[in-house]
C-alpha cells in the first residue's frame, strides 16, 4: 500500500479549520499510525509465526511439559513407558519343615581364663595390654631373670664337677678289678694269698659303691640344672593358647607368687553355643543333630549339637546343651556371652509348600505376590504361615512349580508385562 500524503494533509487542514489546530494534529497522528501499521507487520507476531513453523518441521508439541510431543520422538516415549518391566523370579517349591520352639542361648568360649605365673619373682616387663590379640607361645610378661640365669650357670658347673667324679670312680673301679683278676690268676701258685685275694675283692666292691654314688650325684646335679633352666624359662609368661587379652592383673615392678594372676585371656576363635533347653524338649537334641540358630540380623545359620550335659537344673527343669557353630557362624565374629536364638525341634520333620520371603508384599492389609504367567504379572492374594529360613510356608493361594517375582515387584501392577533379567538384558 502507498501512503497518500496529500489526502492526509488536506484532511488536516479541513479538520483544523473546523475543530482547531490541536485536534488536527491528533487526527494526523492517528492517520499516520494506521497507515504505518498496515505497511510494517508486528515483529513479535512474526517471530512467533516463524517459531511455530520451525516446531512443526521438527515434530513440535503442544506445551513445554511434553504432553504431546509431535513426531517420531513422542511415539517412542509412549512405547518406552508401556514396555515390560525387568524382574527376578523364584520358584514356589516344597521344602522340609521341622516345628521348632525358640530358646535364647549364648556364645561361650571353650578356652578362657587367667594366665598365672609359674614361679615367684618381681615383674620386669609387661608386653601386652587389654584388647591385644596374641598367638600361642607369645610372651605376655617377663619376670626378673638375673638370679635365675646365674642359678642355672651354677647348676651347670655342678654337673661338670660330678661328671669328673664319675669318670674318676670308673677309673678306680677298673684298676681294682684288674688287680683282682691278676691275684686270681695266681690261685694255683705258691705266691697266692687267700687273704690278699679277699682284701682285693673288698676294694673292688668299695670302688663299685663309690661309682654308683658319683653317678647318683651326677643325676642329681643334672636334675638341679634342668630345674634351674625351667625356672628361667618360666620367668617368661607365655600365652597357652591364641586369644585376646581382656584383663591385666599386674604391672612392672609388682611381685608375683607362684600362681599369681598375670592376664585374663579369651580364645574367641573357639566359641560354642550354650543353651538351657527344657528337659521335655531334648528329643531332637541328640549328638550330631543340626539345629537352626539366629543372631540379631535374623539370618538363619546352622550349628551341630556336640553334647547334652547330664546335669539338670532342678528349679528350671533345664539341661545345658553345647552346640558347635558352622563355618558360616564363625565368620560372624561373635563375642563371648553374645545372645543367640536357638530353634529347638519339637516335632517330626514334614514337607511344606514355601515361597521366597522377598516375594511377599502388603497391599490393603493383605499378603500378596505377583505370579508370572504368559509374560505378565498376575496379582495373587496368598495365605502364609511360619518362616522357614529365608522362606514362608504357603497355606493357600499358590501351587508348586509357579514362579513369583522377588525383585522389581514393588513397582508392578496386575497384568503388567514383565521380562526376566538375564534374558537378552
Image: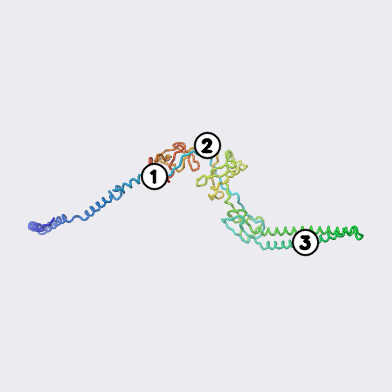
Q: Which residue is mark 3?
A: 167
Element carrying mark 3: helix
Q: In the rendered image, which quarter contains the N terminus?
A: bottom left
Q: Which residue is mark 2?
A: 350
Give me the C-alpha separation between circle 1 and circle 3.
99 Å
Q: Do the residues under discs 3 and 2 have CB atoms within 8 angstroms?
A: no
Instruction: Please rate how many residues cluster around mark 3, counting C-alpha atoms within 10 Å: few if below 14, some from 14 to 19, many from 20.
Output: some
Give me the C-alpha separation between circle 3 and circle 2.
83 Å
Q: Which residue is mark 1?
A: 85
Give me the C-alpha separation between circle 1 and circle 2.
37 Å
- Name which quarter of the figure residue 153 lies in: bottom right
Element carrying mark 2: strand
Q: Position of residue 243 (x, y in %)?
A: 58, 53
Please name the residue shown 26% across and 51% down the image: 57
Mark 3 or mark 2: which is in front?
3
Q: Position of residue 50 (x, y in %)?
A: 23, 53
For this view, does 60 lie left or right of residue 30?
Answer: right
- Name which quarter of the figure residue 192 lies in: bottom right
Q: Position of residue 181 (x, y in %)?
A: 85, 59
For this view, does 349 lie left or right of residue 87?
Answer: right
Sequence-first tag of 1 and 3 = 1
Mark 1 or mark 2: which is in front?
1
Amino acid at each position: 500500500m502507498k501512503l497518500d500524503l496529500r489526502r492526509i494533509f488536506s484532511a488536516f487542514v479541513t479538520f483544523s479549520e473546523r475543530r482547531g489546530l490541536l485536534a488536527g494534529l491528533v487526527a494526523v497522528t492517528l492517520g499516520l499510525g494506521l497507515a504505518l501499521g498496515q505497511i510494517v507487520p508486528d515483529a513479535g507476531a512474526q517471530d512467533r509465526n516463524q517459531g511455530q513453523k520451525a516446531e512443526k518441521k521438527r515434530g513440535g508439541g503442544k506445551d513445554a511439559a511434553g504432553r504431546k510431543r509431535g513426531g517420531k520422538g513422542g511415539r517412542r516415549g509412549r512405547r518406552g513407558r508401556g514396555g515390560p518391566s525387568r524382574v527376578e523370579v523364584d520358584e514356589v517349591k516344597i521344602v522340609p519343615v521341622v516345628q521348632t520352639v525358640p530358646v535364647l542361648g549364648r556364645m561361650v568360649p571353650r578356652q578362657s581364663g587367667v594366665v598365672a605365673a609359674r614361679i615367684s619373682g618381681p615383674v620386669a616387663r609387661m608386653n601386652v595390654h587389654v584388647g591385644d590379640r596374641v598367638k600361642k607361645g607369645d610372651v605376655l610378661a617377663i619376670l626378673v631373670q638375673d638370679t635365675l640365669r646365674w642359678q642355672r650357670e651354677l647348676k651347670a658347673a655342678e654337673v661338670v664337677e660330678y661328671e669328673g667324679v664319675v669318670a674318676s670312680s670308673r677309673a678306680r673301679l677298673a684298676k681294682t678289678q684288674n688287680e683282682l683278676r691278676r691275684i686270681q690268676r695266681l690261685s694255683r701258685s705258691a705266691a697266692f694269698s687267700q687273704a690278699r685275694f679277699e682284701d682285693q675283692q673288698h676294694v673292688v666292691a668299695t670302688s663299685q659303691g663309690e661309682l654308683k654314688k658319683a653317678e647318683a650325684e651326677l643325676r642329681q646335679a643334672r636334675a638341679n640344672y634342668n630345674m634351674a633352666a625351667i625356672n628361667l624359662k618360666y620367668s617368661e609368661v607365655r600365652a597357652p593358647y591364641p586369644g585376646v587379652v581382656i584383663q591385666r592383673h599386674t604391672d612392672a615392678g609388682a611381685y608375683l607368687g607362684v600362681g599369681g594372676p598375670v592376664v585374663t585371656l579369651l580364645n574367641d576363635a573357639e566359641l560354642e553355643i550354650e543353651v538351657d533347653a527344657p528337659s521335655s524338649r531334648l528329643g531332637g537334641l541328640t549328638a550330631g543333630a543340626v539345629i537352626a540358630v539366629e543372631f540379631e540380623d535374623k539370618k538363619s545359620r546352622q550349628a551341630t549339637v556336640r553334647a547334652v550335659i547330664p546335669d539338670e537344673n532342678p528349679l528350671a527343669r533345664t539341661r545345658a546343651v553345647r552346640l558347635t557353630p558352622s563355618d558360616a557362624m564363625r565368620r560372624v565374629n561373635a563375642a563371648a556371652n553374645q545372645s543367640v536364638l536357638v530353634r529347638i525341634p519339637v516335632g517330626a520333620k514334614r514337607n511344606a509348600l514355601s515361597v521366597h520371603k522377598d516375594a511377599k508384599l502388603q497391599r490393603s492389609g493383605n499378603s500378596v505376590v505377583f505370579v508370572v504367567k504368559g509374560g505378565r504379572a498376575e496379582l495373587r492374594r496368598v495365605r502364609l504361615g511360619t518362616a522357614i529360613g529365608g522362606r514362608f510356608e504357603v497355606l493357600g493361594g499358590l501351587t508348586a512349580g509357579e514362579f513369583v517375582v522377588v525383585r522389581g515387584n514393588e513397582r508392578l501392577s496386575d497384568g503388567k508385562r514383565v521380562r526376566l533379567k538375564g534374558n537378552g538384558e
